[in-house]
Image: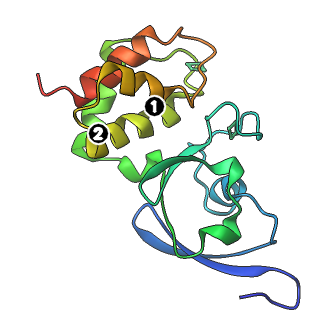
C-alpha cells in the first residue's frame, strides 16, 4: 500500500516471522534486510548481481537480494543464515565447513551456508555437476572452491 510520502507498506515473512516495513519503491531487498531488519549475514558485495554474497532463500530458492526490490517481496518468504541458527542442518553445515576449512575471510560463507541448506532440503541427491552448477552463482575470492565444494558434498551426504 502506497502512502503520501511515496513509501510502500510491505509485509513479508523473514526467518519464520511476519515483518512489516515501509520502503521507497526502489529500495532493494538487501538494504531492507541489512538496515531495517538487522540481518547482517546478507553481505553487500558488487550490488550488480555478480558476486552472490547477498544470496538469501526467497520463497525457497537461492536468490541474489541485491536484484530484488523489497516492494516485489510483499507476501514472500525470506530465509537468511540467522534463520538457521540452532537447527540440525546448521550444526551439520558448520561441522563440514569447519572440517574442510571451507572459508578464509568468511565474506562469502553465509551465501554458501544457505546454498548447503538449500541442497540438503531441495536437492539431497544432487550430483557433483549439479553442486558445481548451483555454486557457480557465488564467488569466493579466497579459498579456490575445492574445500567449499567438498563441504557442500559432505553436507548432503548421509555417510
Ligand atoms: S551483492 Fe548481490 S550479487 Fe553481489
Ligand atoms: S572465504 Fe573469503 S570470499 Fe570466500
Which residue appears farthest toward the bottom when viewing the image? 4
Within 10 Å of disc 2 (Cα), the crowding (few <14, some 14-19, many 20+) is some
Whole-percent x, y for residue 61 in the image: 45, 50
> Badge 2 is on which residue?
123
Q: How is the image coloured?
A: rainbow
Q: Does the residue labelled 1 lie within 8 Å of ligand 1?
A: no
User: Of callouts 2 and 1, which one flags the residue occurring earlier in the amino acid sequence?
Assistant: 2
Q: Residue at x 58, y 52 (%)?
A: 39
Q: Residue 117: which disc?
A: none
Q: Quadrant of residue 116?
A: top left
Image quarter where the C terminus lies is: top left
In depth, the one of 59 and 101 nearer the eye is: 59
Question: Looking at the image, which residue sits at the far right?
Answer: 5
**Closer to the camera in the image, 155 or 90:** 155
Residue drawn at point x = 36 percent, y = 47 percent: 85
For label 1, the crowd category at 10 Å Cα-Cα, with few meaning under 14, some 14 to 19 and many 20 or more, is some
**Residue 55: x and y, percent?**
56, 42
| Residue 127, percent from left and from top | 29, 24
Discs 2, 1 touching: Cβ within 8 Å: yes
Whether residue 84 is situated above or below residue 21 in the rendered picture: above
Circle 1 residue: 134
Q: Quadrant of the N terminus?
A: bottom right
> Element type at marker 1?
helix
Tell me the SS state at disc 2.
loop
State which image quarter holds ligand 2: top right
Tell me what residue is drawn at x 69 percent, y 71 percent. Answer: 71
Report the side of 129 relative to 41 (left or right): left
The picture places residue 100, in percent across and down from the top left corner, at: 34, 12
Measure the C-alpha gap from mark 2 to mark 1: 10 Å
Residue occupying the point 43% across, 60% down:
15
Instruction: Find residue 29 and report its image quarter.
Output: bottom right
Amino acid at each position: 500500500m502506497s502512502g503520501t510520502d511515496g513509501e510502500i507498506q510491505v509485509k513479508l515473512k523473514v526467518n519464520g516471522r511476519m515483518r512489516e516495513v515501509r520502503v521507497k519503491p526502489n529500495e532493494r531487498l538487501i538494504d531492507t534486510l541489512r538496515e531495517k531488519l538487522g540481518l547482517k549475514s546478507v553481505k553487500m558485495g558488487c550490488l550488480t548481481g555478480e558476486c552472490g554474497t547477498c544470496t538469501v532463500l526467497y520463497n525457497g530458492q537461492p536468490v541474489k537480494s541485491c536484484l530484488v526490490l523489497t516492494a516485489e517481496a510483499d507476501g514472500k518468504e525470506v530465509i537468511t543464515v540467522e534463520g538457521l541458527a540452532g537447527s540440525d542442518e546448521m550444526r551439520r553445515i558448520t561441522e563440514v565447513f569447519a572440517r574442510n576449512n571451507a572459508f578464509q575471510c568468511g565474506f562469502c560463507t553465509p551465501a554458501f551456508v544457505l546454498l548447503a541448506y538449500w541442497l540438503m532440503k531441495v536437492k539431497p541427491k544432487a550430483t557433483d555437476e549439479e553442486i558445481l552448477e548451483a555454486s557457480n552463482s557465488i564467488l569466493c575470492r579466497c579459498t579456490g572452491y575445492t574445500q567449499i565444494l567438498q563441504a557442500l558434498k559432505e553436507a548432503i551426504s548421509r555417510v
